[in-house]
């Protein structure tokens, strides 16, 4: 009998302990991780290489690992993964070499950043010291990125992230907003891949949000305005690139926020323009379809940019904005 009674109490105690420990640890794990990353970036910055350059490269690598099956996902706090050839040297027979002497002998670039006399491609300090050294050896951030990635779109994406980190002085830029302030009237439904739409592509790559002329349109994320102008199909449209390798496309506007221009930085809820029905013709064409905002999201994976259905994200941002609006 003692045995039978003992078990539930024992389990109860463990369950209690388990939940206490887990809930304490899960308070703000994402914030803890961001703090840890931020202190690492600052530790390895230099007059030539500011922390936000290191942080932007790291975030870019994290972004592509989330959407690419051919890339292993980094398990540590830092996502940057150097190719083995680069780290240990192309002719080094030991592909996981950590000896600073033999790595140097085989012309590898891996360095020791934490003073343990090892250059370990999985140690955050060693990774950041090696990347900071590489970036510091070039005349500019852009030329260093071009030398490393050899792709203009990648350089643009990383420079965009760096600009956002520099401007907001933080890497915590995950907030989003619904593209229309929720106190306004609007309607939308899932129309992904519908063959007829006003998006200007063969299949409809986005979501149409119907609202009256002049309804304000706000940025859904932190980002840099990459495009602001006329396009035959999209009419007056705005393209914003964010720190998660996403490009947000807003089309058919009646007008823009006149205080903004290409290259400017925006935050969630920055008004970028107003709902209209522009497009499907030469510059200024309007009124060929009901007024609505066409909203699309494109993701860059380091090779190509592809459209994905924004509807689930819109539903979640709308829910959050409605909750906050009631407060
Ligand atoms: Zn559309």
Image (cartoon, helix red, strand yellow):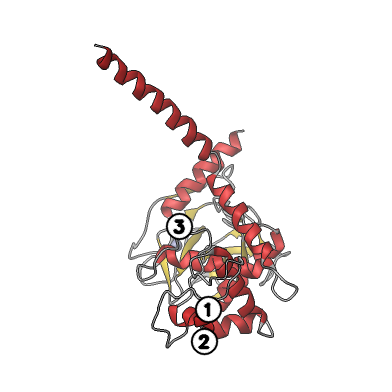
Q: Is residue 32 above or below residue 18?
A: below
> Which x, y percent locates residue 325?
60, 38
Residue underneath mark 3: 208
Q: How many marks?
A: 3
Where residue 128 appears, as percent x and y from the top left, is: 59, 69
* Residue lying at 66% horizontally and 84% vertically, measured from the top left: 138
The residue positioned 54% from the left and 75% from the top of the image is: 231
Residue 275's quadrant in the figure?
Answer: bottom right
SS at mark 3 in the image: strand
Identify which residue, 155 or 120, lies in the foreground.
120
State the image quarter where residue 53 is shown.
bottom right
Disc number placed over residue 105 in the picture, else none: 2
**Mark 2 / mark 1, whichever is N-terminal:** 2
**Separation of residues labelled 2 and 1 (CA atoms):** 34 Å
Lateral position of residue 6 relative to residue 227, left or right: left
- The answer to which image quadrant residue 136 occupies is bottom right
Query: Viewer-proximal residue, 94 or 265?
Result: 94
Is label 3 or label 1 in front?
1
Position of residue 198 in the picture relative to residue 157 (left or right): left
In the rendered image, the residue lying farthest to the top is: 1
- Whether residue 225 is visible to the viewer of this picture, yes or no, is no
Q: How far apart in space, not on screen, are marks 3 and 2 (Cα)?
A: 59 Å
Q: 10 Å neighbourhood of mark 2: few (<14), some, or many (≥20)?
A: few
Point out the image quarter for the C terminus: top right
Mark nearer the N terminus (3 vs 2):
2
> Is residue 160 at all visible to an observer of this figure?
yes
């Amino acid at each position: 009998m003692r045995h039978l009674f003992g078990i539930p109490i024992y389990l109860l105690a463990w369950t209690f302990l388990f939940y206490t420990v887990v809930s304490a640890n899960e308070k703000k794990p994402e914030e803890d991780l961001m703090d840890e990353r931020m202190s690492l970036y600052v530790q390895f910055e230099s007059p030539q290489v500011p922390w936000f350059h290191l942080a932007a490269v790291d975030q870019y690598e994290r972004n592509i690992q989330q959407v690419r099956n051919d890339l292993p996902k980094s398990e540590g706090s830092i996502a940057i993964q150097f190719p083995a050839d680069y780290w240990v040297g192309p002719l080094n027979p030991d592909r996981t070499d950590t000896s600073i002497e033999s790595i140097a002998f085989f012309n590898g670039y891996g360095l020791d950043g934490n003073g343990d006399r090892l250059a370990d491609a999985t140690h955050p300090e060693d990774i950041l010291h090696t990347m900071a050294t590489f970036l510091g050896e070039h005349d500019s951030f852009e030329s260093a990125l071009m030398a490393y990635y050899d792709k203009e779109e990648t350089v643009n994406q990383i420079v965009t992230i760096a600009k956002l980190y520099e401007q907001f002085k933080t890497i915590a830029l995950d907030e989003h907003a619904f593209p229309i302030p929720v106190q306004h009237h609007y309607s939308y439904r899932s129309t992904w891949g519908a063959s007829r739409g006003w998006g200007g592509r063969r299949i409809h790559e986005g979501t149409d949000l119907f609202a009256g002329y002049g309804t304000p349109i706000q940025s859904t994320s932190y980002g840099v305005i990459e495009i602001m102008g006329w396009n035959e199909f999209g009419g007056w449209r705005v393209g914003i690139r964010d720190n998660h390798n996403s490009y947000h496309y807003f089309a058919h506007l009646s007008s823009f926020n006149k205080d903004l221009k290409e290259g400017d930085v925006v935050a969630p809820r920055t008004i970028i323009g107003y709902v209209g029905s522009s497009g499907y013709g030469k510059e200024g064409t309007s009124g060929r379809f009901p007024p609505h905002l066409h909203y699309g999201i494109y993701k860059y994976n380091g090779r190509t940019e592809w459209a994905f259905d924004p509807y689930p994200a819109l539903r979640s941002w709308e829910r959050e904005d409605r909750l906050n609006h009631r407060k």
